[in-house]
Image: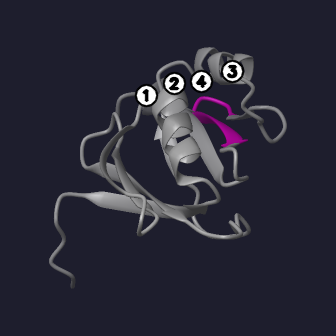
Amino acid sequence: MLDFQDEINCSTGVKDLAAAVAWYEAQLGCMAFFKDEAKGWASLSTPIAGFTLGLAQVEKPNPQGGWTPTFGVNDLEAERGRLEAAGVKFDGPTIEIPHTAKFATFYDPDGNPLMLSQKLGSHRGS
């Protein structure tokens, strides 16, 4: 078994590091705590303790496959509306599993998938 630290980091490729950092800060409330533009890397804290995002500047981002960072929110429809008003593209309608959860997939400017989730019913707060 691995000896884990109390942190999870997901990283993804982006075409323009500065633009991506600005988007993640403005749209998701992240904050860059490390940037090295010469090496094409930025580390961002998220509003969730122990969960950080890494952005790597690459020539051609490849958003196909892989893991999708999912952000739990209290009001998915309100957050979706705010993001859509800012021009963020969503992948279809919100999916709802009755009495369990709602999910909505959206994309950063490089096409990397991200997701919002909201617990419902008896699962909320657990």
Front tag of 1 and 4: 4
Q: Position of residue 64 (x, y in %)?
A: 74, 68
Residue 102 is a magenta residue = yes
- Work out how far the residue at label 1 is from the one at label 2, CA to CA, in angstroms: 6 Å
- What amino acid is found at the position of numbered circle 3 in the picture? Ala
Q: Nearer the viewer, residue 120 or 40?
A: 40
Q: For residue 3, which quarter of the picture?
A: bottom left
How far from the left and from the top, in percent, is residue 97?
Answer: 68, 37
Name the residue that disc number 2 marks: 121
Please rate how many residues cluster around mark 3, counting C-alpha atoms within 10 Å: few if below 14, some from 14 to 19, many from 20: few
> Does 64 sit above or below residue 124?
below
Range of magenta residues? 97-106
In the rendered image, residue 18 lying in the magenta stretch gets the answer: no
Residue type indicated by callout 4: Leu
The answer to whether mark 4 and mark 3 are in CB contact below 8 A is no
Task: Give the label on residue 86, or none.
Answer: 3
Residue count near mark 4 (Cα–Cα under 10 Å), binned few <14, some 14–19, many ≥20: many
Question: Dot 1 lies on which element?
Answer: loop
Marker disc for residue 76: 4
Distance between the alpha carbons at the discs numbered 4 and 2: 14 Å
Pointers 3 and 2 in contact (C-beta within 8 Å): no
CB under 8 Å between discs 1 and 2? yes
Q: CA distance from mark 4 to mark 3?
A: 15 Å
Mark seen at residue 44 = none
The residue at 25%/49% (across/down) is: 50
Q: Earlier in the sequence, mark 3 or mark 1?
A: 3
Amino acid tagged 2: Gly
Q: Amino acid at mark 1?
A: Arg
